[in-house]
Image (spheres, grey):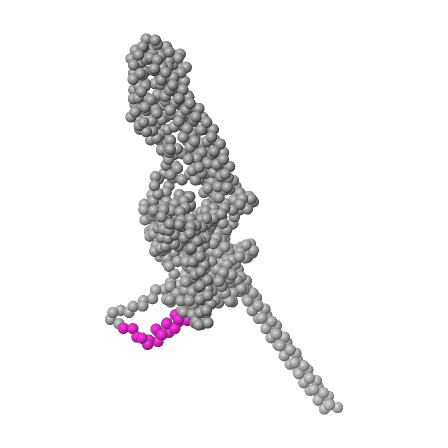
């Protein structure tokens, strides 16, 4: 057959290969059902001599049914079909007046039929079950290796996951090759598995009965003998092909060792694979990220490029479907969800962003290079490789020309445009705060936790309530939950361009009144707002320049709400996180603003990364408590004493880093602020004591001078009286 299963495709395991395997499996299932019926007919002939006539008639009917059975891989002029058409009249003639000797039928016809069903077809069922099991183990091992942390890799965990993937992939490859080879051979075995019982039956009939002169013709006997010899040759040829297939499987297994391990650990001495950056077509399995209700999920699927499109196809689908248009797209590296080899593809209209993950660094580099070539339209050229080389030369020339033009035009343009100033300011802000990232947290965690006030109660862990299973259309919260949220939730912070006072201010006057443009109170209010805005704008610079402790984190604001002053603060943070996330899910509010959370021993500021303006600023002494969510440490919140609202507010965030590091930074800043206040208080107390001691010494010295004067006056008076008496 020209459409045999290729053993070289077993390792890739593409959906096309799976679809072809499915066709073979359906054909084998039909063959299994038919062979069981044929075997049952043969056993009936051998079992009941008295029922020989009825059994031969049923056998003849089964042979007729073969012509109506539509095997997927059998043509109308197949050897089995043509041979059955030639032999069927003889079977009908024998079944009309002959009986079969039970012993001969058992030794010939029943033996071959039973061997085909119980040996070959039973082996098919066993290999099919083993193929499904090894495929599931391979998928689990691949997913486990993909979950290995990029930031905190564990050599032992990496080695274990790699060993598991190596064993599962090698086992799946070998099982797949054996299974596909067996399916190919079964198509050949089907010929003698079905025909040999029929030929044996006819030979037994001719050898035992001598009364059927028409059947015992010499030409018929020669035909059956020749047919039997041909079937024997086919069986021997199939055995030789099977031996050759086993040797080929061994060679493929030996040459595929490097493919079993996507990214070998450093302890394994494997050479790096060369990256082909001139490709305009690529295919393979990738992990892609999908957004769930609140958290992202990763799925493994088969992707391939077709022209300028990225196609996706699952194992059970016959054809792929459009996943993303790659024309004029943008492909970039990305660091997300602690995943290795991740990259994102942005469509030309910036409306869709797809995040993908390669299984290995080699696959990751080739996919990015290929998508970049497709985005540049190189797939439209007759010679894509020459187009890629030309593109590289053009890029090098353009970079050189741009560098020369920039160097020549630099003295002529001393002033920068506002856009360039803002961009340079943004880069300087990120550069300036890059040094503030908490690299010292591992050293101060123990000190910070031990310096916290001993009277603070240990936080009680509260996990978010699980989502309702009966909620429809993606809703995670019921109407009862909606009613329980009594306090309003703020999902966005005030813009830096408005006043820092969070209380609502009515800015539009009534229709029958006109505002006084020179009202003193309005002028004073505007001046106060301007001063407050200038003060907030300079918070980041003041913290960077004056604070002894500094740290900066990238966070996304979830929401804030008021909490009661007499409640447990730890429980309030967990409850606020649950209510905010549930409210966002209920109202389908999944867009969050990214902020820079700047922590120092003086204040806590939420800075807009685009404008570098402070959205909110709190003294570090007003931060009463901070805590992460138990099941997801990237979710955190803190409670502050709001000075303007004179109430407690709980702010919740999702952090790019570990939320425990953010809480550790807040606790460290609080401890340092508390130590600073205690130091200042002790210094003032010491100054007061020194001043009191100085005043005491001065008072004692004054008292001593008065006593000396009184003694001198008494002595003078006594001397005067003595002189008068004398």
- Image coordinates of residue 350 in percent, x first then y, are 36, 56
Q: Is residue 77 magenta?
A: no
Residue at (41%, 15%) from the top-left corner? Answer: 107
Which quarter of the rendered picture does the C terminus lie within?
bottom right
Q: Quadrant of residue 715?
A: bottom right
Where are the magenta residues, as a range?
514-531
In front of the other: 654 or 435 = 435
- Image coordinates of residue 652 in percent, x first then y, are 42, 56
Q: Is residue 93 left or right of residue 239?
A: left
In front of the other: 447 or 68 = 68
Q: Is residue 528 magenta?
A: yes
Residue at (34%, 56%) from the top-left corner? Answer: 349
Residue at (29%, 17%) from the top-left corner? Answer: 89
- Residue 99 visible in image: yes
- Image coordinates of residue 185 in percent, x first then y, are 41, 28
State the residue lying farthest toward the left: 512
- Residue 651 visible in image: no
Residue at (42%, 32%) from the top-left corner? Answer: 180
State the residue lying farthest toward the front: 219
Q: Is residue 74 left or right of residue 552?
A: left
Image: 83 above or below 563: above
In front of the other: 182 or 548 = 182
- Provide the major secondary structure of the magenta segment: helix
Which quarter of the rendered picture does the N terminus lie within?
top left
State the residue lying farthest toward the right: 726
């Amino acid at each position: 057959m020209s459409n045999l299963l290729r053993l070289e495709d077993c390792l890739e395991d593409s959906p096309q290969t799976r679809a072809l395997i499915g066709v073979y499996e359906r054909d084998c299932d039909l063959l299994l059902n038919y062979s069981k019926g044929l075997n049952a007919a043969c056993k009936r002939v051998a079992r009941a001599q008295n029922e020989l006539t009825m059994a031969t008639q049923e056998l003849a009917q089964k042979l007729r049914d073969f012509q109506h059975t539509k095997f997927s891989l059998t043509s109308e002029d197949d050897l089995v079909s043509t041979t059955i058409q030639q032999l069927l009249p003889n079977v009908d003639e024998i079944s009309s007046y002959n009986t079969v000797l039970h012993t001969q039928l058992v030794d010939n016809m029943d033996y071959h039929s039973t061997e085909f069903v119980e040996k070959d077809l039973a082996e098919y069922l066993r290999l099919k079950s083993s193929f499904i099991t090894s495929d599931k183990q391979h998928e689990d091992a691949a997913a486990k290796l993909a979950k290995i942390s990029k930031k905190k890799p564990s050599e032992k965990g990496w080695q274990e996951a790699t060993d598991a993937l190596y064993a599962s992939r090698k086992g799946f490859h070998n099982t797949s090759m054996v299974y596909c080879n067996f399916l190919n051979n079964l198509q050949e075995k089907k010929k003698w598995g079905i025909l040999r019982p029929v030929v044996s039956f006819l030979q037994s009939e001719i050898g035992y009965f001598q009364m059927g002169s028409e059947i015992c013709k010499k030409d018929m006997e020669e035909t059956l003998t020749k047919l039997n010899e041909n079937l024997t040759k086919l069986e021997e040829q199939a055995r030789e092909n099977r031996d050759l297939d086993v040797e080929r499987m061994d060679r493929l297994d030996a040459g595929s060792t490097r493919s079993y391990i996507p990214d070998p650990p450093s302890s394994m001495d494997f050479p790096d694979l060369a990256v082909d950056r001139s490709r305009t077509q690529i295919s393979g399995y990738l992990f892609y990220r999908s957004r769930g209700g609140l958290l992202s999920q990763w799925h493994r699927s088969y992707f391939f490029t077709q022209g300028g499109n990225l196609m996706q196809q699952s194992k059970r689908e016959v054809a792929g479907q459009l996943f993303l248009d790659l024309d004029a797209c943008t492909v970039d590296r990305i660091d997300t969800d602690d995943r290795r080899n991740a990259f994102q593809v942005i469509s030309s209209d910036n409306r869709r962003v797809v995040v993908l993950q390669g299984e290995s660094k080699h696959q990751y580099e080739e996919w990015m290079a290929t998508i970049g070539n497709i985005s540049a339209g190189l797939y439209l050229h007759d010679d894509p490789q020459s187009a890629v080389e030309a593109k590289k030369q053009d890029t090098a020339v353009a970079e050189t020309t741009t560098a020369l033009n920039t160097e020549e035009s630099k003295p002529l343009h001393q002033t920068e445009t506002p856009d360039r100033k803002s961009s340079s300011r943004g880069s300087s802000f990120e550069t300036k705060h890059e040094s503030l990232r908490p690299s010292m947290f591992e050293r101060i965690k123990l000190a910070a936790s031990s310096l916290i006030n001993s009277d603070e109660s240990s936080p009680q862990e509260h996990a978010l309530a699980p989502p309702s299973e009966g909620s429809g259309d993606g809703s995670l919260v019921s109407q009862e939950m909606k009613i329980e949220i009594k306090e309003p939730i703020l999902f966005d912070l005030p813009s830096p361009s408005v006043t820092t006072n969070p209380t609502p201010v009515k800015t539009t006057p009534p229709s029958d009144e006109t505002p006084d443009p020179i009202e003193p109170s309005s002028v004073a209010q505007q001046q106060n707002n301007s001063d407050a805005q200038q003060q907030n704008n300079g918070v980041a610079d003041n913290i960077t320049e004056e604070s002894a402790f500094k740290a900066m984190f990238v966070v996304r604001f979830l929401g804030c709400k008021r909490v009661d002053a007499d409640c447990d603060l730890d429980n309030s943070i967990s409850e606020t996180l649950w209510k905010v996330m549930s409210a966002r899910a209920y109202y389908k509010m999944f867009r969050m603003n990214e902020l820079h959370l700047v922590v120092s021993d003086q204040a806590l500021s939420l800075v807009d990364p685009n404008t570098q303006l402070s959205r909110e600023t709190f003294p570090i002494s007003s931060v009463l408590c901070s805590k992460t969510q138990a099941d997801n440490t990237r979710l955190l919140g803190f409670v502050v004493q709001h000075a303007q609202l004179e109430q407690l507010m709980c702010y919740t965030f999702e952090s790019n880093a570990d939320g425990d590091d953010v809480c550790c930074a807040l606790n460290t800043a609080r401890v340092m602020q508390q130590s600073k206040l205690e130091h200042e208080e002790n210094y003032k107390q010491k100054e007061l004591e020194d001043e009191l001691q100085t005043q005491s010494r001065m008072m004692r010295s004054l008292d001593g001078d008065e006593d000396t004067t009184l003694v001198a006056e008494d002595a003078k008076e006594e001397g005067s009286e003595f002189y008068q008496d004398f």
